């Protein structure tokens, strides 16, 4: 794919990424191909400015995409499509750290309980079951009918098991 990478392609990819809050589709080998392209530019000619700009573009693109990936991780969601190999490694490493640092409020009844206690004030929300719940005040005990709703509330640090 590196033969298709050009300065214009990098610029257009960055502009496309800036236009949306979603991750845009890029090839899995995008960063490796881009590095090959940048290394093919002769530093000792007029093209050295092109090389510096290409490095700036790819750096800015990666930073924007990392921020978007962090949002997916913060909301405990998987990225919607295949991402570049470097980004997949970043996603996996940060996800592992985030999972290890979640607040676990294990209470005597454990995950099988359908009663939870809100840890924050909750406005009316739509639950995975399609039911609406709320509003609830902090520390209010809530009895749920659907175990998936309970799991959703606890996994997203909205409630804790009783």
Image (spheres, rainbow, N blue to C red):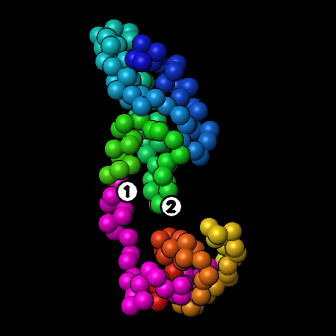
Q: Measure the alpha-carbon separation of dots 1 and 2.
A: 11 Å
Q: Secondary structure at mark 1?
A: helix
Residue at image coords 51%, 21%: 9
Q: Which residue is mark 2?
A: 75
Out of 81 and 21, give the one closest to the viewer: 81
Q: Quadrant of residue 131?
A: bottom right
Q: Position of residue 142 (x, y in %)?
A: 59, 88
Out of 126 and 119, give the one closest to the viewer: 126
Circle nearer the N terminus (1, 2): 2
Q: Which residue is mark 1?
A: 95
Query: Which quadrant is the N terminus positioned in?
Result: top left
Q: Position of residue 93 (x, y in %)?
A: 32, 52
Res. 78 mark: none
Mark 2 residue crowding within 10 angstroms, few (<14) / some (14–19) / many (20+): few
Q: Position of residue 126 (x, y in %)?
A: 67, 70
Q: Is residue 55 visible?
A: no
Residue at image coords 47%, 60%: 76
Q: Which residues are the magenta region?
A: 94-122
Q: Position of residue 98 (x, y in %)?
A: 37, 62
Mark 1 residue crowding within 10 angstroms, few (<14) / some (14–19) / many (20+): many
Left or right: residue 48 versus residue 12 is left
Out of 20 and 110, give the one closest to the viewer: 110
Disc 1, disc 2: CB below 8 Å? no
Q: Secondary structure at mark 2?
A: loop
Q: Is residue 157 visible?
A: yes
Residue at image coords 59%, 77%: 146
Instruction: Confirm whether the magenta stretch covers residue 99.
Output: yes
Left or right: residue 76 versus residue 31 is right
Instruction: Confirm whether the magenta stretch covers residue 18.
Output: no
């Amino acid at each position: 794919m590196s033969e298709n990478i050009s300065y214009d392609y990098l610029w257009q990819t960055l502009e496309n990424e800036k236009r949306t809050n979603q991750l845009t589709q890029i090839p899995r080998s995008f960063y490796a191909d881009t590095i090959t392209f940048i290394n093919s530019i002769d530093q000792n000619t007029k093209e050295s400015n092109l090389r510096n700009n290409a490095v700036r573009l790819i750096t800015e693109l990666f930073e924007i995409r990392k921020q978007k990936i962090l949002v997916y991780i913060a909301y405990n969601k998987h990225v919607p499509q295949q991402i570049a190999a470097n980004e997949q490694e970043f996603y996996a490493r940060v996800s592992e750290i985030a999972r290890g640092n979640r607040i676990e409020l294990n209470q005597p009844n454990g995950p099988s309980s359908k009663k939870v206690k809100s840890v924050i004030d909750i406005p009316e929300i739509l639950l995975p079951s399609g039911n609406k719940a709320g509003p609830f005040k902090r520390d209010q005990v809530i009895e749920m009918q659907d175990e998936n709703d309970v799991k959703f509330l606890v996994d997203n640090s909205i409630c804790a098991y009783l």
